[in-house]
Amino acid sequence: MRNGKRLAAAAISVVLLFLAALSLSSAVGRTQSNAKDPVAQKPGVSPDAPASAYGMDVPLAYYHLSFMLSKRTGGITPPVQARIFAYMGLALYESVVGGMPHNTSIAKALHGIGLLPRSDGTKYWPLVASAAMAEVMRGLWGDVTNVAAQNVADIDELEQQIADSLDLPGSLARRSIEYGRAVGAAVYQTSRDDGEDRGYLTNFPTSYVPPVCDGCWVPTAPGQIAMQPFWKNAMTPFVLTPGDCGEDSPPAFSIDPASDAYQEAYDVYVTRNNLTPEQITIARFWADGPGSINGPGHSLSTATQILQRVGANLADAAETYARVGLAVGDGVYAVWWSKYTYNWIRPVTYINRYIDPAWGALLPTPPFPEYTSAHSGQTSAAINTLITLWGDIAYTDHTHDNDGFAPRTFASLTDSMNETAVSRLYAGIHFHSAIDEGIDQGRCVAEKIDALPWRK
C-alpha cells in the first residue's frame, strides 16, 4: 500500500510539474508564443477577473489525470467513458460560465439535467474550476469502481495541490471552493438517474439474447458477450432523442457476389490481405482498445492538444471540453442506438462463412454489432465540434507517445478524422458502410451540440 501511495503521488507530481512548466512543445506540438501563465494568480489580475483572464492549466491537469484513470479503472468501456467525459465537461463549463460574460448556461437545454447552483459574488475561476472538476470526478471515477480509493486519493491530492499553489484571501478561496464543489456535486447527482449510473458494473449483461438471422451479429470469439446492449434504451442522451442521427440502415443482407453486402465484405477481405506497413501502423495507432486511453479518451486528448495548439484560456477550455464531452457522449449513444437497432453482422463472421473460413482480422473484433462504427461516429462528433470552434487546423497527435508510437501529423482535423475512420477498415473490423455512415452520424450529433445556446 505504501508503494502504491508513492506511485500515485509521483503520478500527480508529474502532472503538476507539467502544469507549472507548461513545456509541452515536445509532447503536443504546442506553439510557445501563446503559452499561458501557470495556475498561480497572475500579477495585476483582479480577483473578480473573468475566466478568460486565466490559463487552461486547471482543466488540463484534470483531463490528463482522467486519461491515467481510464487505463487503470475497470469497466471503462467506450459508452461508460463517453458518459463520464460528458459530465466532466458539463461540470467544468457550468462552474465557470458565471465568469464568461458572453456565454450562458446550457443545463436547461439538456435532457434530465436539473437546476444547478448559480454564481453570485466574486469568484476566483481557476479555483472554482478545480473544485467542480474534483467533486464530479470523485463520483464518476470513484463511487464503486474497482480502484475507487486510489482514484479519489489522486483527485483529492491534485485538488489540494492546486489550492495550495494559490495565494488568495481566505474568504475568496472558501467561496470559490464551496461554489465549485456545489456545481460538481449537483452535476454528479443528476448523473445518478440517467439510466446508466455505475454502467462500469453492467457492461456485459448475461440476460441479453441477441436476435437470430442470417445477417445478424453473433459473438466473434469464444465466450464473448455483447457489450452494453441495453444502452440505447436505458441511457438518457444529453441532446438527442432516440433515433436522432440514426442514419440509414446497412445494406440488405445477401451472399450474391454482385450484392453490396458481398462486395463490402470482399473489400475488407482484400484490404486486410494486402496491408502496407503504414496501414498496419494506422490501424494500431487508432486501436484504443481495452486498457488504453480508449476511443472517447483519444477524442478528448485531441481536444486537449488543439487547445494547447491555439493557446486557449480557461473560458475557451471550459466551452471546448463541454462541447466535445457532450459530442462524444451523444455520439456514442447514437452509434449504440444504431448497433442494437440493426444488429448487423461483423466482417469476420461474413468472410469466414461465405468467402474464406481461415481469414482473420488484424485486430480483435469488439464485442458488439457492426453498424455503425463507434470510432467513426464519436470521433466525427468530436472533430466536427472542434472544427466549429477552432477551424479545420493542422496538428500533431502525440496521444500515444508513451505507448511506443511515433506522433502523427495531420494537415487538418478532417484528415485526422478520416484516418481514424479508415483505420477500422485496415483492422478488418468494419465495413465501409459502417465507417461512412458513422462519420455522417457524428457530424449530425456535432450540429445538434453546436446548436445549443452557448452564447448570449
Image (tube, rainbow, N blue to C red):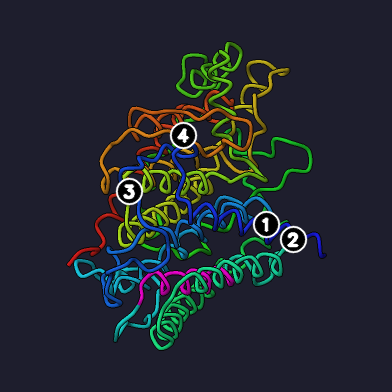
311 is higher (above) or lower (below) than 200: above
Q: Is residue 451 above or below residue 145?
A: above
* SS at mark 1 in the image: helix
Q: Nearer the viewer, residue 21 or 258?
A: 21
The residue under the point 32% across, 57% down is 313
Would you say residue 222 sits in the magenta stretch? no
Task: Give the answer, above or below, for where 84 lies relative to 413.
Answer: below
Give the extent of the magenta segment: 124-139
Circle nearer the N terminus (1, 4): 1
Is residue 137 highlighted in magenta? Answer: yes
Crowd band around label 1 with a 10 angstrom C-alpha radius: few (<14), some (14–19), many (20+): few
Q: Residue 425, image x and y in percent? A: 52, 25
Q: Element at badge 3?
A: loop
**Pointer 2 and pointer 1: residues touching (CB < 8 Å)?**
yes
Label 2: few (<14), some (14–19) or many (≥20) C-alpha neighbours in 10 Å: few
Q: Amino acid at mark 1?
A: Ala
Mark 2 and mark 3 residues within 8 Å of each other at the beta carbon: no
In this rendering, which labeled residue sits more in front, label 4 or label 3? 3
Q: Earlier in the sequence, mark 1 or mark 3?
A: 1
- Do the CB atoms of the residues marked 1 and 4 lie less than 8 Å apart? no
Q: Which numbered mark, 1 or 4, is in the foreground of this view?
A: 1
- Which residue is the site of mark 1? 10
Name the residue carrying label 2.
Answer: 6
- In the rendered view of the protein, which quadrant contains the C terminus? bottom left
Q: Which residue is mark 4?
A: 434
